[in-house]
Amino acid sequence: MSFLEQLNSYPARELKDRIESIQQSQIDAALKSSRIGIEEFICLLSPRMDDTQLETLAASAHRLTTQRFGRTIQLYAPLYLSNECHNGCRYCGFSADNHLLRKTLNHAEIEREARTLHSQGFRHVLLLTGESPESAGIDYLEASINQIKSLFGSIAIEVFPLDQEGYQRMVTAGVDGLTLYQETYDPELYSELHPYGPKSDFSFRLGAPERAGASGFRRVGIGALLGLGDFLTDSFYTGLHALYLARHFWRTQITIGFPRIKPAVGGYTPQQQVSDRQLTQLICALRLLLPDAGLVLSTRESASLRNHLLPLGITQMSAGSCTAPGGYAGENIEGEQFSISDHRSPEEFSRQLQQFGYEAVWKDWDNAFLLDNR
């Protein structure tokens, strides 16, 4: 069974009614359970969870995270290669409908960006593009990866969905991680939000993490853009999707991101605002459902909120981020995908982690490990 088939076995209206009808006693039972499965996860998403229950959930998430990951946070940096895009996503700053400075980095600019991040201490980097095959297609990605891979122990991509052959090319080039957000798991809403462009194919995007897992990626990251669709159903489907991938691709680490929609060029207004409390509850519930998953929090969120969420399940964070091509070397600060909220420098963020009793991990992987095992 593909994940699309599993997704269709949980109709959204019935699912939402079920989550909203959960009783306090069911939440208590789930919190006391020694093993969290889908049924317990549904209970832990309940909007009826009170403050005392949330505190119990948070304590369990903290304890489990410390057991599995210690007091460490892996640091990474996003590196935007291009903001050129043919998609008409209504909520995205890179949308083809928006008038902004378009740029695809050339060889020299990529080198400067990569060396700037390397000098800041980063050894895990995430490469991002829009969807413009003639400007930043798979050949461009391969060349970019080959150019910078000597500087980083781990290179991940957050780009347009590829077929399995494309993902295999990425792995061969030296990529070990993929991040691909479904944005929303509601097919009808997805169609409304993506009126034209290659990204309008809901099923092809949904199947991309499975193709990546089958291609041998060491790490695959998923998530929903919180605020686009119904929070409760998108939260459940995110957990269901992650659990599916973890069971089918057991050699691959699954990570989950929690991006809340932010202001961007174009003026899109989210369907709903996701509160800090809702975000906290979701992170903690997912930690209990997936004890070994990497949970990722970006600089979309404020420094204060990131500090508070630090002990509750988060294992990976970005720092000093820029969401425009060329932003790190200072050549271009226009054409951002979205605005960031945590403006601490990598050095400052690392120091604050230490003050909180956490260790900033700049590197915990190198592709040489794979070569040693071949």
Image (cartoon, rainbow, N blue to C red):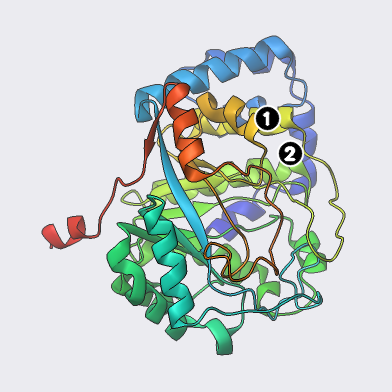
Q: Position of residue 73 (x, y in %)?
A: 42, 36
Indicate the secondary structure of the residue bearing disc 1.
Answer: loop
Which quadrant, please, contains the C terminus? bottom left
Asked whether, in this view, residue 108 is left or right of residue 251, the answer is right
Q: Residue at x 71, y 58 (%)?
A: 338
Q: Is residue 133 above or below residue 111?
A: below
* Residue 86 rendering spot, x and y as whole percentages: 69, 81
| In the rendered image, the vertical position of residue 339 relative to residue 160, given as above or below | above
Residue type (three-letter) at the residue carrying disc 1: Leu
Residue at image position (59%, 67%) is 205
Quadrant housing residue 199: bottom right
Mark 2 residue crowding within 10 angstroms, few (<14) / some (14–19) / many (20+): many
The answer to whether any part of residue 168 appears in the image is no
Residue pushed farthest top? Answer: 52
In the rendered structure, which disc, 1 or 2, sits on the residue that comes first in sequence?
Answer: 1
Tell me the tag on residue 76: none
Q: Mark 1 and 2 residues: CB-CB less than 8 Å, in contact?
A: yes
- What is the C-alpha distance between the residues marked 1 and 2? 7 Å
Say whether residue 51 is left or right of residue 189.
left
Instruction: Report x, y in % for residue 304.
Output: 65, 30
Q: Which mark is residue 45?
A: 1
Disc 1 crowd, CA 10 A, few/some/many (<14, 14-19, 20+): many
Q: Quadrant of residue 351?
A: top left
Toward the front, the furthest residue is 330
- The residue lying at 58 percent from left, 46 percent from top is 298
Q: Closest to the observer: 282 or 37?
A: 282
Q: Which mark is residue 232?
A: 2
| Farthest residue, direction bottom | 134
**Three-letter amino acid code at the position of disc 2:** Leu
**Count of residue discs:** 2
